[in-house]
Image: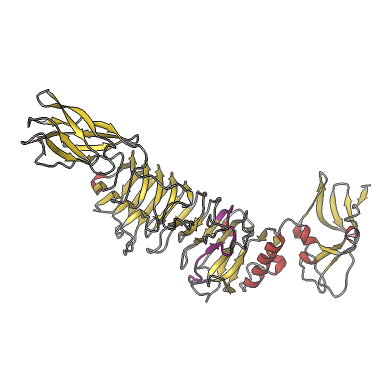
């Protein structure tokens, strides 16, 4: 016959549940030889390796006056002076059902979910929602005057099931289109190490799109919204961005929102907007889409809190990494307003099939604008970029404006618009030290200009040399005068020119970013085989010192200037 052992003193106690009409005492607890914890015939858990694991689903006690809520089950523990202790406080997580948040009822679950979220914050434990659908509507207004349905004070919110579609939160019919469906707010001095996992927000579940932003994350009142994990989340198309990250940096928390965080294996069907994002954010295997031509798949502004340099780069947040992601957009795919060091690696980026909105979006698929502040270092490594569809008006793959050191390395550009003529890289006069390296296209004829370069110090692009004072290219199929800059800072000139009468004289001008820091004297070879020299000056002048007007080869002119950023950055 199987021997049974008594539960240790702290557990060998009468158990009761509340609320009830009168306290009801259950049979004595015991642990059998197999390590099972039992109350009479009911198995509550199992003891292994000196630890007791309680199965929450077994703590649904029904009876007259009972809610079935395991969180009301209490134990009188002699070691605490007989004060009842809720057994739910011994569990590693809270469950929405225990607060009345029941799935698939079609009823309003807003109040029940908010009660559960509040208790999860107070007890510092995760909140788990079982599979099914939960309808919500507006319940409050934040201190920033944004209405919301659910309020999470940066707690772990986890849906049961392996797929995001198993647990779904949706706005009920009639929910206004400015209501944030889930608001995640970091309280003062809190908000670190939280997660959102394994659930979906579906704004159109009721048949029409309701609600506003899917997930709104903000660090008000000195909260520190950081070290977050967002994994296996999907937000379907709605009336606003799927995810909006709002950082409000202060002296106490200058790093912005979502610093040192990871977003993994998720899908945002109406794009994300980052405003005041903090340092070191990783986006991996994430899908970004939009259902509107006026929203970008990714729109980004990082925090720049520094009272001494309010518009400079002294405190720009650093390192935003997007790896193995997919961008599919009706409007621009990526819009960058400021920042320090973005990395887009091995990602697929496509737009098209609808007319792109105008009004400042520049017709660019990827717009590194830098209109809020400068952008320092953007890297596109590998990956594929495509413009498709017969109705899209997109004309440019990359527009590079107020950016220091934009690097395109190994990307493939595909122009799929019928009869389209576009630009691969539109580099403005505000751009500095852009690098174009091993970029390919499957349809060169679709580009009026693969690189339209007006930038300072662009590397990897052959540029025509501006000739002056009657100097001309010799023509006849001979290479025209030009120059290029390598990534190690060497400027190389090439081509053959005819200086014309009046030598010695200035024959050309190098633009800013391609000029020597000190005067250079370099030997050249004339058509006759004779040797002469040119002098290069800091103002860009190329001075031919010879007296003959016979053709000059420029191919021997090579010199080095600063191989890094042309302008000195302010120290952070």
Q: Is residue 207 above or below residue 418?
A: below
Eyeballing the image, is 392 above or below 104?
above
- Is 466 positioned to the left or the right of 429 in the image? left
Q: x and y percent of residue 471 in the render?
A: 10, 39
Dominant secondary structure of the residues highlighted in magenta in the image: loop
- Residue 552 in percent (x, y) is at 13, 31
**Foreground: 499 or 269?**
499
Which residue, as the protein is rendered here, is positioned at the far top? 529
Most foreground residue, 97 or 310: 310
Looking at the image, residue 268 sits to the left or right of residue 157; the answer is: left
The residue at the point 86 percent across, 55 percent down is: 38
Judging depth in this view, the residue of 80 and 544 nearest the camera is 544
Residue nearest the observer in this picture, 41 or 223: 223
Residue 486 falls inside the magenta stretch? no
Asked whether residue 226 appears in the rendered view, the answer is yes
**Which span is picked out in magenta?**
208-232
Kindly tell me whether residue 268 is visible in this rendering: no
């Amino acid at each position: 016959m199987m021997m049974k052992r008594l539960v240790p003193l702290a557990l060998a106690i009468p158990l009761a549940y509340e609320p009830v009409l009168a306290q009801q005492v259950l049979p004595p607890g015991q642990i059998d030889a197999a390590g099972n914890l039992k109350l009479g015939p009911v198995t509550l858990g199992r003891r292994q390796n000196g630890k007791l694991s309680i199965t929450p689903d077994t703590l649904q006690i029904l009876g007259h006056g009972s809610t079935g809520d395991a969180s009301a089950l209490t134990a009188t523990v002699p070691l605490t002076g007989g004060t009842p202790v809720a057994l739910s406080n011994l569990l590693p997580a809270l469950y929405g059902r225990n607060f009345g948040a029941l799935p698939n009822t079609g009823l309003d679950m807003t109040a029940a979910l908010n009660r559960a979220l509040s208790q999860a914050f107070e007890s510092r434990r995760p909140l788990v929602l079982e599979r099914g659908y939960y309808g919500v509507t507006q319940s409050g207004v934040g201190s920033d005057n944004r209405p919301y349905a659910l309020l999470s004070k940066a707690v772990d919110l986890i849906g049961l099931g392996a797929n995001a579609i198993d647990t779904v939160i949706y706005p009920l019919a009639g929910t206004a289109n400015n209501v944030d469906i889930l608001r995640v707010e970091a309280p003062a001095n809190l908000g670190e190490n939280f997660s959102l996992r394994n659930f979906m927000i579906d704004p159109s579940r009721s048949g029409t799109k309701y609600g506003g932003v899917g997930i709104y994350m903000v660090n008000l009142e000195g909260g520190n919204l950081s070290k977050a994990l967002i994994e296996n989340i999907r937000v379907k198309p709605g009336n606003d961005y799927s995810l909006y990250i709002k950082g409000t940096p202060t002296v106490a928390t200058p790093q912005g929102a979502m610093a040192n965080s990871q977003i993994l294996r998720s899908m945002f069907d109406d794009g994300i907007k980052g405003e005041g994002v903090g340092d070191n954010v990783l986006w991996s295997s994430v899908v970004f889409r939009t259902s509107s031509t006026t929203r970008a798949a990714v729109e980004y502004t990082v925090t720049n809190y520094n009272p001494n340099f309010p518009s400079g780069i002294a405190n720009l947040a650093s390192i935003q990494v997007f790896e193995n992601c997919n961008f599919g957009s009706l409007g621009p795919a990526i819009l960058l307003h400021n920042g320090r060091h973005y990395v887009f690696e091995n990602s697929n980026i496509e737009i098209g099939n609808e007319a792109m909105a105008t009004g400042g979006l520049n017709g660019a698929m990827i717009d590194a604008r830098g209109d809020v502040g400068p952008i320092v270092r953007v890297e596109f490594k590998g990956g594929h970029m495509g413009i498709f569809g017969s109705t899209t008006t997109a004309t440019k793959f990359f527009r590079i404006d107020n950016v220091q050191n934009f690097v395109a390395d190994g990307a493939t550009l595909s122009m799929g618009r019928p009869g389209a003529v576009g630009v691969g890289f539109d580099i403005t006069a505000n751009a500095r030290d852009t690098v174009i390296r091993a970029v390919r296209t499957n349809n060169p004829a679709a580009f009026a200009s693969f690189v339209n370069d007006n930038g300072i110090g662009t590397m990897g692009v052959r540029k025509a040399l501006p000739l002056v004072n009657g100097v001309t290219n010799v023509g006849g199929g001979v290479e025209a005068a030009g120059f290029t800059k390598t990534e190690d800072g060497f400027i190389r000139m090439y081509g053959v020119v005819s200086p014309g009468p009046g030598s010695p004289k200035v024959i050309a001008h190098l633009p800013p970013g391609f000029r020597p820091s000190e005067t250079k004297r370099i030997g050249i070879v004339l058509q006759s085989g004779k040797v002469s020299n040119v002098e290069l000056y800091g103002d860009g002048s190329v001075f031919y010192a010879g007296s003959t007007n016979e053709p000059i080869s420029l191919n021997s002119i090579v010199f080095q200037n600063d191989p890094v950023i042309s302008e000195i950055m302010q120290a952070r």
